[in-house]
Image (spheres, rainbow, N blue to C red):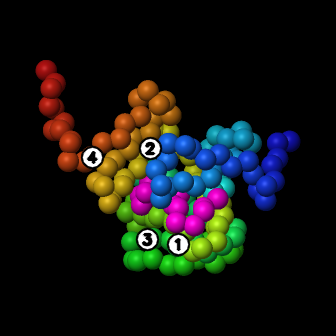
C-alpha cells in the first residue's frame, strides 16, 4: 500500500515561477502512482497564486481549502474561501478559476482532478491555449490569435 500524509507534504517551489505565482507544490497523485486522477497540495504564501486564471477542456477539477483564506476568482466574480470549503470546477468556461492568497497569512489548498491525456487548457486573460500531450516535446502553448486555417500549408 502506498500512502502519504497530506498534513506534512514535501513542497517544491519552482525557481522559474515569476513573483505572483510562487506557490509550493506537492504532487501527491504522482507520488502515490495515480494514473487516472491527480491530487496536489499547494502552499500559497501571501500575495501568490497557484497559476493563471484558466479552465480545463477535458478535466474536471476540485478544490478543498485546508488552511487560510485564499481568494477564488471564477466567472461570476471573486470570493474569499474558508478552511474546509470545497469547490468543483466543471470542464469548459463555466469552470474557469484562479486561486490567489490575498491575505497576510499562508494558505493551503488541496486540488484533485481527473487526468486526461491529451487535454487542453484555456487562459482567457491572455488568450492562450495549452495542449498537453503527456510528452513535453510535443506540448504546445500558443495565443489563439496565432491560429491558422485547417488546410493552411497542406497539399
The Cα–Cα distance between marks 3 and 4, rounded to whole angstroms, is: 21 Å
Horizontal arrangement in the rendering, residue 148 relative to residue 73 (left or right)? left
Tag on residue 55?
Answer: none
Q: Residue 33: image x %, image y %?
A: 71, 39
Tag on residue 119?
Answer: 2
Identify the image quadrant of residue 148.
Answer: top left
Mark 1 vs mark 4: give the one in front. 1
Identify the image quadrant of residue 77.
Answer: bottom left
Magenta region: which residues?
43-56
The Cα–Cα distance between marks 2 and 4, rounded to whole angstroms, is: 16 Å
Q: Are marks 1 and 4 in contact (CB under 8 Å)?
A: no
For the point 52% across and 66% down, the residue is 47
For the point 57% across and 71% down, the residue is 70
The Cα–Cα distance between marks 1 and 3, rounded to whole angstroms, is: 15 Å
Tag on residue 102?
Answer: 1
Mark 2 vs mark 3: give the one in front. 3
Residue 83 falls inside the magenta stretch: no
The Cα–Cα distance between marks 1 and 2, rounded to whole angstroms, is: 30 Å
Query: Which badge, 2 or 3, comes first in the chain's sequence?
Result: 3
Query: Which badge, 1 or 3, comes first in the chain's sequence?
Result: 3
Q: Secondary structure at mark 2?
A: strand
Amino acid at each position: 500500500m502506498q500512502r502519504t500524509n497530506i498534513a506534512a507534504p514535501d513542497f517544491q517551489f519552482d525557481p522559474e515561477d515569476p513573483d505572483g505565482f510562487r506557490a509550493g507544490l506537492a504532487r501527491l497523485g504522482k507520488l502515490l502512482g495515480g494514473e487516472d486522477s491527480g491530487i496536489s497540495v499547494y502552499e500559497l504564501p501571501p500575495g501568490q497564486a497557484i497559476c493563471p486564471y484558466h479552465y480545463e477542456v477535458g478535466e474536471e477539477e476540485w478544490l478543498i481549502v485546508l488552511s487560510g483564506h485564499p481568494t477564488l476568482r471564477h466567472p461570476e466574480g471573486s470570493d474569499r474561501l474558508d478552511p474546509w470549503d470545497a469547490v468543483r470546477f466543471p470542464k469548459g468556461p463555466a469552470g474557469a478559476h484562479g486561486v490567489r492568497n490575498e491575505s497576510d497569512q499562508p494558505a493551503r489548498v488541496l486540488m484533485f482532478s481527473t487526468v486526461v491525456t491529451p487535454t487542453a487548457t484555456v487562459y482567457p486573460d491572455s488568450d492562450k491555449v495549452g495542449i498537453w500531450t503527456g510528452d513535453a516535446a510535443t506540448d504546445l502553448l500558443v495565443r489563439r490569435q496565432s491560429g491558422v486555417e485547417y488546410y493552411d500549408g497542406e497539399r
